[in-house]
Amino acid sequence: MPIQQLCTVAAATKLNDYAWHLVLEAGRMASMIRPGQFLHIKCGHSRMLRRPISICEWMGDEPEDLVSVVFEVRGDGTAWLSRRKPGDRLDVLGPLGNGFDVQRKEKYLLVGGGIGVPPMLGCVTPGSIAILGCRSADREMPALTEKFREECKEVILCSDDGTVGYHGFVDAQVRAVLEKDKSFTAVLACGPKPMLRAVWRAAAEFGVPVRVSMEERMACGVGACLGCATPMADGTMKHVCKDGPVFNAEEVDWNA
């Protein structure tokens, strides 16, 4: 069950012109986290709706039990959040959602696009390969890229415009990796829906299962509203916040 508590900001870092990294003293919340889950953070007293922020890393080091989140400034709420300083306190609900079932002994191909890159850091296991995509060099988060390099067997960068890494989309690199090695337990991916669809189709050519973390706008974060309902392949609707954000790729209606 998620808990609601006040978390102290331990560190705040600007990763590029668009993204920020916050480290929170989260207490016992940290021990409850699974890869791929998110926090619902209240962004100022005048803003009724919380903002869902994916969890990047968590460290059980009592008494603080640190949790880090990365977000892009996309509106008033996240702009307010980007101005928080060490010592500030945040009203946090979490951890929320069903995450990735990551086993330390398994090998995964990790694929992140844009703000979908940070949550993949929590999925790293020995032998994993990470494919990280961004629009352009100014959108890359070098500090996170370096952390992936420290923990992964290999890191592959690509960008839409070719200003960093390979020129092109992540699905091309998924095909390139799987052509050489099909022994991955699964492909784990997070990013925009068109990217996830392309990754699923690429991996399907090699028979490798895909689990995706969906990005949808959320309101309540606990399944009480219909803000993040998404169509499934069997004709049903599921809530990204409660039933996901992680789904087996074949569950999702990619044509909706």
Image: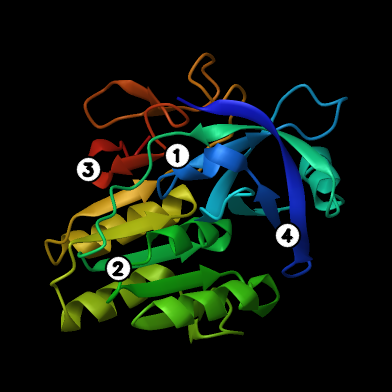
Q: Is residue 93 above or below residue 80?
A: above
**Residue 177, picture quadrant:** bottom left
Packing grade of label 4 (10 A; few <14, some 14-19, many >=20) is many
Label 3 sits on what residue type? Glu
The residue at which mark 1 appears reads as 32
Q: Is residue 158 above or below residue 224?
A: below
Packing grade of label 3 (10 A; few <14, some 14-19, many >=20) is some
Comes first in the chain, label 1 or label 2: 1
The residue at which mark 3 appears reads as 250
- Is 184 on the left-hand or right-hand side of 47? left
- The residue mark sitting in front, 3 or 2, is 2
Q: Identify which residue is drawn at 36% across, 83% down.
A: 154
Q: Nearer the viewer, residue 223 or 31?
A: 31
Q: Secondary structure at mark 3?
A: helix
Residue 20's disc number: 4
- The residue mark sitting in front, 1 or 4, is 1
